[in-house]
Amino acid sequence: MDVVINNAWVLTLKNNRLGIIKEGAVGIEGDTITYVGSSKDLNYKQADILIDGTKHVVMPGMVNSHIHTSMQLLRGGAQDLPEIEWMNKGIGPLAKHLTKDDIILGSKLGVLEGIRTGTTTFSEYTKNVEELVEKVYLNYGARVVATETINEVAQKDRSKLKPTDLYELDVAKGDLALRRNEDIFTKFKKSDLVSCLYGPQALDMVSIDTLSEIKRRAIENNSRIHMHVAQGERERIQIEGRFGKGSSTVKILKEKDLLGDYLIAVHCHDTNETERELMVNENVKMIGCPSSISMIDGIIPPIFHYAQLGGDVGIGTDQAPGPGNHNLFREMRTISLLTKTMMKDPTVFPAWEMLQLVTSQGAKVLGLENKIGTLEVGKKADIITFNLNQLLLTPVVSQPFHNFIPNIVYSATGTEIDNVIINGDLIFHNGSFVKVDEQKLIDEANARGEDIYNNAKEDWISADSKMVKDVKKGLL
Amino acid sequence: MDVVINNAWVLTLKNNRLGIIKEGAVGIEGDTITYVGSSKDLNYKQADILIDGTKHVVMPGMVNSHIHTSMQLLRGGAQDLPEIEWMNKGIGPLAKHLTKDDIILGSKLGVLEGIRTGTTTFSEYTKNVEELVEKVYLNYGARVVATETINEVAQKDRSKLKPTDLYELDVAKGDLALRRNEDIFTKFKKSDLVSCLYGPQALDMVSIDTLSEIKRRAIENNSRIHMHVAQGERERIQIEGRFGKGSSTVKILKEKDLLGDYLIAVHCHDTNETERELMVNENVKMIGCPSSISMIDGIIPPIFHYAQLGGDVGIGTDQAPGPGNHNLFREMRTISLLTKTMMKDPTVFPAWEMLQLVTSQGAKVLGLENKIGTLEVGKKADIITFNLNQLLLTPVVSQPFHNFIPNIVYSATGTEIDNVIINGDLIFHNGSFVKVDEQKLIDEANARGEDIYNNAKEDWISADSKMVKDVKKGLL
């Protein structure tokens, strides 16, 4: 075998159970898992790389179902702002000064911090995703689900529009974007690390004709549509303006025959129970982004509601300016606590369910359940090890229950991950990246950070957000 | 000077501002801060210990305003349970098997994990607090505010009572406890690390006569009363039973002249706006425990409401079985996010205010504002360094605002702390405890953990909580 991890607590996450194996081992040949079982039944002496799993949990690499890494250099750039100021007065004046290289550099930061905290699959959503796939994800050996943004809004600068001004849609723009979207299917066809989705940005930003064409192609290509659905007021106003008072995104999608098992709906904040039932019945998948949305909008994503109806749900970290980073351990705890308080019920979203959300459920939402998301012979070797040997997780007990299951969800920080294997490759080993010079990247990002903010200084100050006022008061 | 930290971003937290000093230094002689200012104006070549603060933030040690460490060995022992099961069927059957030594050992874990994540002052609340002060806090050199529990409930085992059965109160029991409480004042009078509070457990568990006597002594001793106030339904039922329908804890405290600047009220979940106004007007201090209470009860503590009224508020971690650990970085982020969603307003509880809650505000609530909570010449040297040089906090930018302020609150994990100084003593240095063998403690706790759970196994299973059912389903 090429790699063996032995003597560990193995969590297979198979069949909607934890599937705990005591003194378990996982064996890998090439890119594939070839053994999951007891350590003592495996002859691991012939392994090329042997990782001692003593006092460790071994589990499937985590799936970040919705992520934008392109603004990562703006981490900490906008938060504690009124929702309406966040983009226009907070991030906007800074983002204007990001160069193409800054986007690549930022994305590198985002992907490495994801890997470092146990994420092996990233569902990246951006314009010109091809470049990030090549220069960042494949460069680092990360698994990526690539979505190219398709947006037909004609106006380049929407910050000049009033909320009630309807966007003009430019179908030619959509065509171009759809061509870029199709290109990635061709380009990465043979890559085992890349899969592709279609990315109409939202119902208010694409025409029904384009959406219908995308649906046709998604079905033809055996792929899915990854779309922001019913995110909030901005979208609602546009939908009512275009389709009439009382219209909603979900109603229109249903009416136009655009709800189906090919749809992955992100956010869904502005949906009601009836609409969510409709979506679940049509086998639509849902993704929520707990830290991002609670931080920027003060909203708890309806992930629990959707799961309660029997829908498949995944978790994403969305973007960094706001909540800060791409750490799925943090997201497990965040959505569990937020949901417990929303429902005034401490039993909802228990630890085991959080572990499923970021592994097997995430894989299912993205259509990768036959490839990743659990530890099973024949699946791709996306595997992480979690070091239980530390103060904040002590004691480790296995009788009459495994106390480390809740502790991984509620006590861990994400920094406990010490090995990350993606597609059979050991990317992060004993707490360090095998091929990446992490400190060099940090230094580059720091240098660029100072430059970007320096260039953006005047724009940022003249936007006069609440943050500018806080700076003047010595609070930022 | 004995210790100097130079070239750092110093946050003084003075005067309700961040008080950021670029390339700043802090100097210490004995137990006292003797320099806070620019690095270049300080001759630090004569320092006994020089800590290079490059790429670090130096800030006041954090104040955990309400903590019970005695059940720390039961971390991960009960969560995701109905509130009513948590104590009786979750923790109870395990806690019965904790020995006196287990309580000490657990407390050690709790205090060390607090120090490791930047806490320098612990407001410990327990029965027989004297033992923890001596064997744990002073042993490790931690600053402690010690509260001895005073509880007059006659019934030893309350699990047999129906919720509507009134407790019998035994004033003799209260007298004994009050004597223990007074003893710690005498015993630790000369210790610079220890201060003491009075600890009537809650209004439903002590008589008005005892409370009035405690108040008299607290004022005489220039101390304060640290009490659980209006925690929830159990207390409400008892108060109405004793004082009549429509009674509430706050109303009774007011009526009996027991609200004043000597009172530190923990929790306050079952208070309304009028009652909170009354408390703030009487200069009562409030403490909330975000992770603990959201996890166990699905409740968001009314910390924001109290602060909005102008009241002084602090943050505590309460106990570990449930939320897991004592990490105030986690608490800052947790209460900010919970409050943003509760108020549906992302501007509330911004980063700078969270930093105040766990430093200057915490000190004020406990009556220690002249001693700790900010970095100022003449104050006690409780100081932590936070390493900004890492992936999850990159880039670090200082113009036109300091992006690391929100990043410390929203992105940090608490593991970034690499030096902790308490009362001038360097306890934790470059990521390791100076005098404590951390691994030895972890190993001891693991061994005891397995024993305790093994002994408790039958009791735990026969209590038949939801957790037992989850184990049977392979989910725990």
Image (spheres, coloured by chain):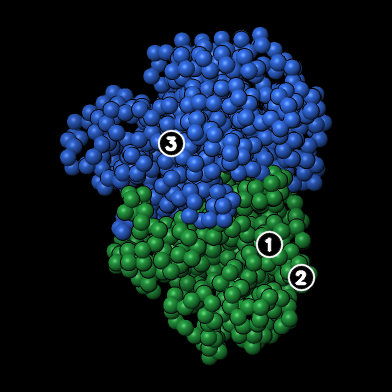
Chain colours: A green, B blue
Residue A108 to residue A181: above or below: above
Mark 2 belongs to chain: A
Of residue A102 and residue A158, the one placed in the foreground of this image is A158
Of residue A57 and residue B374, the one placed in the foreground of this image is B374
Q: Residue at x 26, y 43 (%)?
A: B24
Of residue B350 and residue A374, the one placed in the foreground of this image is B350
2 or 3: mark nearer the eye? 3
2 or 1: mark nearer the eye? 2
Side of B427 relative to B471 (left or right): left
Q: Quadrant of residue A203?
A: bottom right
Residue A337 to residue A296: above or below: above
Q: Which mark is residue A278?
A: 2
Whichever of labels 2 and 1 marks the residue nearer the N terminus, that label is: 2
For mark 3, give the secondary structure: helix
For mark 2, give the secondary structure: helix
Q: Which mark is residue B361?
A: 3
Q: CA distance from mark 2 to mark 1?
A: 15 Å
Q: Residue B165: percent from the left, percent from the top?
A: 79, 24
